[in-house]
Amino acid sequence: MIEAKHFIGGEWCPPSNGETLAVLDPSDGKPYSRIARGTAADIDRAVRAAHTAFGGAWGAASAAERGRVLYRLSMLVAACGEELAQIEARDTGKPLKQARADAAALARYFEFYAGAADKLHGETLPYQAGYTVLTVREPHGVTAHIVPWNYPMQIFGRSVGAALAAGNACVVKPAEDACLSVLRVAELAAEAGLPAGALNIVTGYGHEAGAALASHTGIHHISFTGSPQTGKLVAHMAAENHVPVTLELGGKSPQIVFADADLDAALPVLVSAIVQNAGQTCSAGSRVLIERAAYEPLLDRLATAFNALRVGPWHADLDCGPLINAKQQQRVWDFLSDAQHDGIAMAAHGQVVADAPESGFYQAPTLLRDVPASHRLAREEVFGPVLAAMSFESEDEAVALANGTDYGLVAAIWTRDGARQLRMARRVRSGQVFINNYGAGGGVELPFGGVGHSGHGREKGFEALYGFTVLKTIAIRHG
Ligand code: NAD
């Protein structure tokens, strides 16, 4: 494994100041690897390398050639899927089966954008007599990608896959808590034939390497995924240089269950949407809004399911792994202690297995009932396996509850009534709405992003390619 080096200009480079950071295994809280502590000098070197690639071999590659490189990369990722999954599972703490799904999604992102690369085109526009007007979609140039620790491979893939397909050269700052898989993918990209400098990775802290990247005058677009607070900082830095920015900042996503819904189908999805990745998912279904008539029966079934959940180290491959670090664990404890203090009832909780190391960052999945709409547990992102249950009497009340947070990333509506499905889908303020499912199995093809404090701009699907290009209008006067 490559340790404590950046990937810049197609080479492994030691950090400019020689400093490194420890990487902890969330399953036992102990250091097991090191990464380079990136500085502004490292970022500057990476941005220069990206400019060289954009002005050289990568910029000169045709759309079809870019697609071929990405396709080879998708094949290499698929071939190394188990290795990548093991790296990711240990680094993030997630159960191995979830990391395997992430590796498969990474391969799929590169495959999808490989196919899309030469299908991105402009238009001809009807205009005055004597003119022909056309639009062309051009890459921004050098794009910056700031990636969080919860899904390093997937978020890297969706952002970098689209940016490369569109012809940009990328500089990536993955999260200090989990970035080893992304470094391995950089090696695979070189093996796939990606020219040196088209993809550069600088590791390190957000306030150091991340801030240096977001404020660098040599970048032309920023894609950021992480917390609303950091997103705001990044947007300010982007504004200083008039650089467009895509922000994906999390949510407090509701699953709205009407009494006529297929509760057998809904139940496992309600549980997995908050338990997946120990709730550390921007699109986690962290609120369940249940029509009064179905509230008690569904809560009983949810409680039984939560009580059966088991939490343990990544290699035990249980329902849940540990949280990423002690800070995140403390954050979840703070929310739960507020719930206890404010008299919110815990309806059920899972169990951390007895042989899980005490020094790991474990948290049992927890179901809270009758959470008041005004409470922070109904409004703020916990980013842990905590599900807040609330009841409603009418569609209007369900909409008011669903839209009662600053966020708007994902929502689900469970009902057999077709007219209500559409009515609710249109009334809920959210970037994605799922009817009688949640997440549609990942959906590499499906545009993803939020409104309000969930951010703006869209990643995934073909839509992402528009964000990673600039539209140029060319008007030709020919008489
Ligand atoms: P964060 O937003 O601080 O970190 C995300 C990324 O931004 C990391 O790569 C980090 O190094 C970088 N970063 C941090 N400070 C920066 C700065 N000043 N300039 C540029 N880049 C910077 O998130 P966190 O502290 O790791 O987690 C805190 C909370 O963020 C979580 O509890 C959760 O609510 C939220 N979060 C959301 C997502 C998501 O997918 N939406 C992912 C991770 C965390």
Image (cartoon, helix red, strand yellow):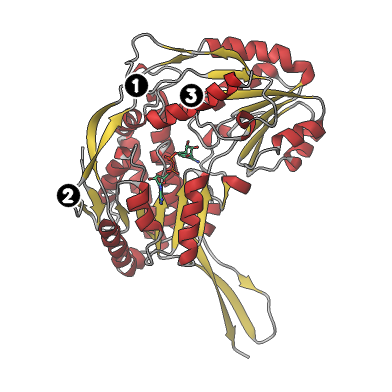
Q: Give the quadrant of residue 298.
A: top right
Q: CA distance from mark 3 to mark 2?
A: 36 Å
Instruction: Name the residue tied to disc 3.
Output: 333
Q: Give the quadrant of residue 80.
A: top left
Instruction: Name the residue tied to disc 1.
Output: 360
Instruction: Name the residue tied to disc 2.
Output: 18
Q: Position of residue 220 (x, y in %)?
A: 43, 64
Residue 152 sits above or below residue 438 on the image = below
How many discs mark residues in the rendered view?
A: 3
Q: Pick whichever of labels 1 and 2 is earlier in the sequence.
A: 2
Q: Callout 1: few (<14), some (14-19), or many (20+) C-alpha neighbours within 10 Å? A: many
Answer with left or right where residue 38 lies relative to residue 159. Answer: left
Residue 208 sits above or below residue 359 on the image = below
Q: Position of residue 56 (x, y in %)?
A: 30, 68
Answer with left or right where residue 446 lies relative to residue 208. Answer: right
Amino acid carrying label 3: it is Trp
Which residue is painted at 30% across and 25% down in the image? 29
